[in-house]
Image (cartoon, rainbow, N blue to C red):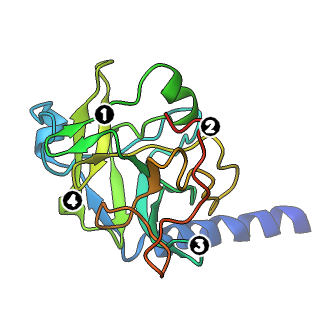
Amino acid sequence: MRSRRTREALLLVPAAAALMLVSACGATAIDTAASRSGAAGAGSGPTTVQQAPEFGKEPHQMLSATESRQVGWFVADAGGFALYRYDKDSAKPPKSTCDDECLKSWPPVLVGEHTMTSGVDPTLVGSVARADGKKQVTLAGWPLYRHTGDKKAGDLTGQGKGGTWFAVTPEGKKAQAEDGAAPGRPSTGDGY
């Protein structure tokens, strides 16, 4: 006869599996033939996403539309951490300019095997080749980053940094407060 703890643990396994299936509902998976064959070039169409190792070890990544009182709609990763765009980068053509010291505060979101989107148009998701040879995820052409100052899901500590860093909207634009102002106190610290 099994102990009560063993029975309870066995009941949790199907519940966890069901939760994983339900949480994936409404999400769109992106896995292009070009990305599997390595034929995708800089600025090419939909690709797949993987976070830099220090920020996520999930086998599948997510770009999710998320709403906050501070900035309205913005994109978060699978862990709920805000993703940012940098005004010194370019979208047409996509180009990442954050390197060296900048990367210590603003690690790039790197291309991996799979990503899912929820509330983000998968046709806006692409990639760009970085100077270091890695491929970085783009949204509407803008390279995406995390901010090391964000310690928990929903933090937006990078918003307005140096007047050049902004949470990215599901359309690839700068997240803004309802009054149209880009919230956050512009600072010179890690704004590059």
Q: Considering depth in this image, is 14 or 106 the residue closer to the camera? A: 106
Q: Considering depth in this image, is 143 or 15 the residue closer to the camera? A: 143
Q: Earlier in the sequence, mark 1 or mark 2?
A: 1
Q: Earlier in the sequence, mark 4 or mark 2?
A: 4
Task: Count every numbered label the image shows and give the total.
Answer: 4
User: Which residue is pictured at 62% across the width and 63% down the height?
Assistant: 154
Q: Dividing the picture into quarters, in which one does residue 7 lie?
A: bottom right
Structural crowding at the residue carrying mark 1, measured as other residues with C-alpha within 10 Å and reported as few (<14), some (14–19) or many (≥20): many
Choose mark 3 or mark 2, whichever is in front. 2
Residue 1: tell me if it is visible. no
User: Which residue is pictured at 29% across the width and 20% down the height?
Assistant: 131
Tag 4 residue: 124
Choose mark 4 or mark 1, whichever is in front. 1
Choose mark 3 or mark 4, whichever is in front. 3
User: Pointers 3 and 4 in contact (CB under 8 A)?
Assistant: no
User: Pointers 3 and 2 in contact (CB under 8 A)?
Assistant: no
Q: Amino acid at mark 3?
A: Gln
Up/down of 61 relative to 23, above or below: above
In 3D space, how far apart are the residues under numbered discs 1 and 2 (Cα atoms)? 20 Å
Structural crowding at the residue carrying mark 2, measured as other residues with C-alpha within 10 Å and reported as few (<14), some (14–19) or many (≥20): few
Q: Earlier in the sequence, mark 3 or mark 2?
A: 3
Q: Amino acid at mark 4?
A: Leu
Q: Amino acid at mark 2?
A: Gly
Q: Position of residue 75 (x, y in %)?
A: 43, 63
Tag 1 residue: 96
Choose mark 4 or mark 2, whichever is in front. 2
Q: Secondary structure at mark 3?
A: loop
